[in-house]
Amino acid sequence: MHISLILASVKKNSEVLLPSLTFAATANAVCYAGAVPHFVDSEEETFGICPQKLDSYLSHIFDIQNEVCINKKTGRQISAIIPVHIFGHSCKIEDILEVSRKYKIEVVEDAAESLGSFYKGKHTGTFGKLGAISFNGNKIITTGGGGMIITDDKQLAHQAKHLTTTAKVPHKWEYVHDQVGYNYRMPNLNAAFGCAQLQRLPEFLQSKRELYERYCEQLSGLNGIRLIKEPSGCSSNYWLQTIVLDEPDEELRNIILTALNEAGLMSRPAWTGLHKLEHFKESPKMDMKVVSTLEKRIINIPSSSFLCE
Ligand SMILES: Cc1ncc(COP(=O)(O)O)c(C=O)c1O
C-alpha cells in the first residue's frame, strides 16, 4: 500500500480518503507516504465506503482548483481515495470510481482481504490505478508475510519492482541507486509457499463458501442477527464470516463474544473506528453515523478454510 500510494503520486501533506472501518495498516500506509488520513463513513450492505455519502460530503467540503481537488477547510489537496473490500466482500467500487472521476481523485484499492473476490466478474484490486493484496498469515493464502501490488500499467509495475528492491539501477557490478528505495522484496522461499498455495486457491474458496452455507443453515431461524452474505452481483471469498446484530447493542455483543471465546470459538468484534484512535484524533473526518453503530453490531466468527469438516 505504501508503494502503491507513492506510485499514485500521493504527495507529502496531501490528504487521502479512506474508511474509518478498516485495519490500521490502511491508514498507516497513508502516513508512511507523508500524507494525512481523512476518514469517511461506511454503508451497511458491504461495510465499504458509502459512495452517496462521499459524493455529498465532497460537494460541500471540496473545491476543484486547477484540476486538483482541494479541501476548503485545510487547504490541502486530496490526492487519493482507498476503497477497502472489507472481510473479503467487494465494496461498491463502480460507484466509488464514479465519485473519484467527478472530483479528479486517484483510486488505490486495499484488496488485502479480498483475493478471490469479484465485483461483477472483475477481480477486486483491479479497478484502481493500483491495488494491493496481503499474504499475511491470516489471509486466504499466505507467504508468512508480505503481499502483492496489482496494476495493468507496465510502467507502474516496473517502478513498483524498482522501488521495492532498493531502487538499484540494473548493472553487472556497480551499485547505483537512483532514489531512496525500500527493501520490500519478497524472499524466494516465501514466494514459493505462495505459488504452491495459489494452485489450491479454488479449493480454499470453495471450502470458505461451504462454511458460509453451513453457518447459514445453523443460524437460520435465530432472531436478532443476520449472517453477512456476498453483495448482489459480486462473488466473495468469505475471508471472514460475520454476524451482525439487528440493533447496535455493545453489551449484547460483548456477552456473545465472551461466550464464544470461553467456548474456544475465537471470535472478534470489528476494528475500533480508526478516527477514534489517539494518534488519528486530529485527522479530518466526516460524521461516522454508520461506523459508530456497526462497531456495536459486528461479530466475526471462526472462518478457517479447514473448519467446514
Ligand atoms: C484491510 C487491510 N489492509 C491492510 C492489511 C495489511 O496487510 P499486511 O498484514 O500484509 O501488511 C490488512 C491485514 O493484515 C488488512 O486487513
Image (cartoon, rainbow, N blue to C red):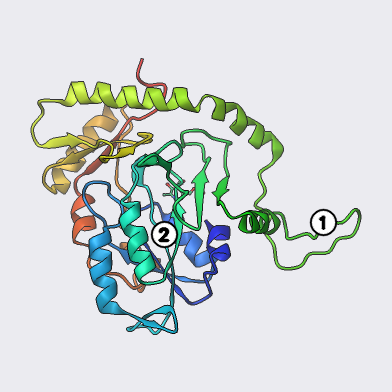
**Number of disc labels:** 2
Amino acid at circle 2 = Ile
Return the residue at label 2: 82
Upstream in sequence: badge 1 or badge 2: 2
Instruction: Say which mark, if any, is on residue 86.
Output: none
| 309 left or right, relative to 107 | left
Mark 2: secondary structure = loop
Q: Nearer the viewer, residue 211 or 58?
A: 58
Locate residue 233, reporting x and y percent. Answer: 29, 40
Q: Is residue 28 visible?
A: yes
| 248 left or right, relative to 201 | left
Going 48% across and 64% down the picture, which residue do you hit? 30
The C terminus, quarter of image: top left
Going 35% across and 36% down the picture, which residue do you hit? 236
Corner quadrant of residue 70 = bottom left
For disc 1, the neighbor class at 10 Å (few under 14, some 14 to 19, many from 20) is: few
Locate residue 259, reporting x and y percent. Answer: 22, 31
Q: Nearer the viewer, residue 287 or 198?
A: 198
Return the residue at label 1: 170
| 270 left or right, relative to 218 | right
For disc 2, the neighbor class at 10 Å (few under 14, some 14 to 19, many from 20) is: many
Locate residue 156, reporting x and y percent. Answer: 62, 58
Residues under labels 1 and 2: Cα distance? Answer: 32 Å
Amino acid at circle 1 = Pro
Going 13% across and 47% down the picture, which residue do you hit? 249
Q: Look at the picture and state if 61 lies above or below 277.
A: below
Q: Nearer the viewer, residue 140 or 232?
A: 232
